[in-house]
Image (cartoon, rainbow, N blue to C red):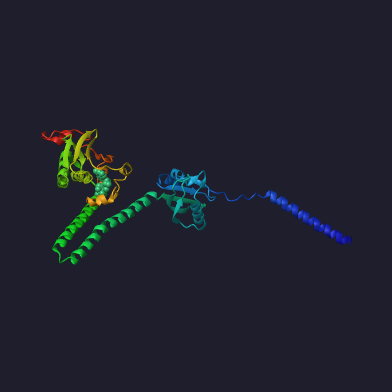
Amino acid sequence: MNELLASFAAMGGFLVGTLVMMAIRRQSEPVREPEPVDDSLSPGVASVLAVLPSSAVVLDREDRVLRASSAARAYGLVRGDALMAAELLALARKVRRDGEIREGEIEVPGRKFGQESTTFAVRVAPLGSTGQVLVLAEDQTERLRVEAVRRDFVANVSHELKTPVGALSLLAETIQDAAEDPEAVNRFAGRMQHEAARLTYLVQDLITLSRIQGAEAIPTPGPVPVDEAVHEAIDRCNTKAASKDITLVAGGTEGLNVWGDDELLVTALRNLIDNAVAYSPEHTRVVVSARPAGEAVEVSVSDQGIGIPEGAQERIFERFFRVDAARSRATGGTGLGLAIVKHVAVAHGGEVTVWSKEGSGSTFTLRLPAFGGVAVAVPRTTSTPLEAAT
Ligand code: ADP
């Protein structure tokens, strides 16, 4: 028994000894720290991010924002050191896990109540092997808006083309059926001509609009004598005006010159005068008048017509917007006239404005840059009038 007790005591002593030894050894061993993490951003990456136009964010391996461009903060993608878009954060984690670059489109809700959400095209990529992730986000609002406008425009054009084409085909059928009745054939043929003319105007206006919306709307700008443009535009509208006994009058300051394209200026004025005639009662006057206005020349077209309701005045320059669609069609309108005028003004670096009162009339004013930088009236008798203006 004593032997047994002695051997237990010896084992106990050994165990205590071993534990003490282990404890001593532990204390003398250096403590193993976790691997240091390099969370700094290399200067090369930082300078690339500084020049990127898109919103850029770099996340560390704990999903904290290491660097964010001011655009990313302005859009509300980043607040403090947190990436706010949950969808984007999930994408960043996936990228960190498998190292694969990912792209996609995400929608970020507006920051304030009632504010519209923003759609971003995003690209997320691993940055080196430290677990950092780069997030690039591009605002798609403008691209989506332009796409929507284009889709609308194509739908509108198709609709506008369908009406006269449908009418033409119906009229052709009617003529076939009325082959025995020369008077009816004559009447329907006349209506066919009317519809064909409408189609022609529409196609012409579409071509004009696409030309002036192009990058090089005015390839060779030069001095344009305003009097000549006004007289040419009036000449082209005279027949229509005469049919309603409307007098077209040119007035204001003579001898002014603008900087631009004569054909486009005539087109814009013709559209304004055409409208003035179309939306005025018989036996009225339309006055086209030019005046110097500092660095610009203002040409206004005033009528004594039906006027435009205040609520519609902002929208009349939109393509295919009409206050009264039936009236516009009856007068042969394409709904593109004022859109063309607006684009001509913009292409010249100018603008077009409207004043109107229902029942009293309207005045449209084209403001275009003066030739030579300042509007100067050069008398027609001068032998070198345009040199004098510079
Ligand atoms: P439209 O071919 O229909 O005349 P526009 O683009 O030229 O198309 O004009 C758009 C709309 O603005 C017209 O349908 C008409 O309702 C209104 N409008 C334009 N000019 C005048 C005017 N001088 N007087 C009254 N309304 C006008």
The number of numbered badges drawn on the structure is 0
Q: Is residue 299 visible?
A: yes
Residue visible at 38% across and 52% down? 144
The quarter of the picture where residue 268 lies is top left
Q: Using residue 167 as the reference point, say whether residue 145 is left or right of it.
A: right
The quarter of the picture where residue 289 lies is top left
Residue 318 percent location from the top left of the image:
30, 47
Q: From the image, which quarter does the N terminus lie in?
A: bottom right
Q: From the image, which quarter does the C terminus lie in?
A: top left
Q: Nearer the viewer, residue 78 or 323?
A: 323
Q: Using residue 49 as the reference point, say whether residue 199 is left or right of it.
A: left
Residue 260 percent location from the top left of the image:
21, 42
In this picture, is 231 found above or below 167? above
Residue visible at 21% across and 62% down? 171
Q: Nearer the viewer, residue 223 or 208?
A: 208
Residue 210 percent location from the top left of the image:
25, 51
Residue 266 percent location from the top left of the image:
19, 44
Q: Residue furthest right?
A: 1
Q: Using residue 172 as the reference point, say whether residue 121 is left or right of it.
A: right
Q: Is residue 220 visible?
A: no
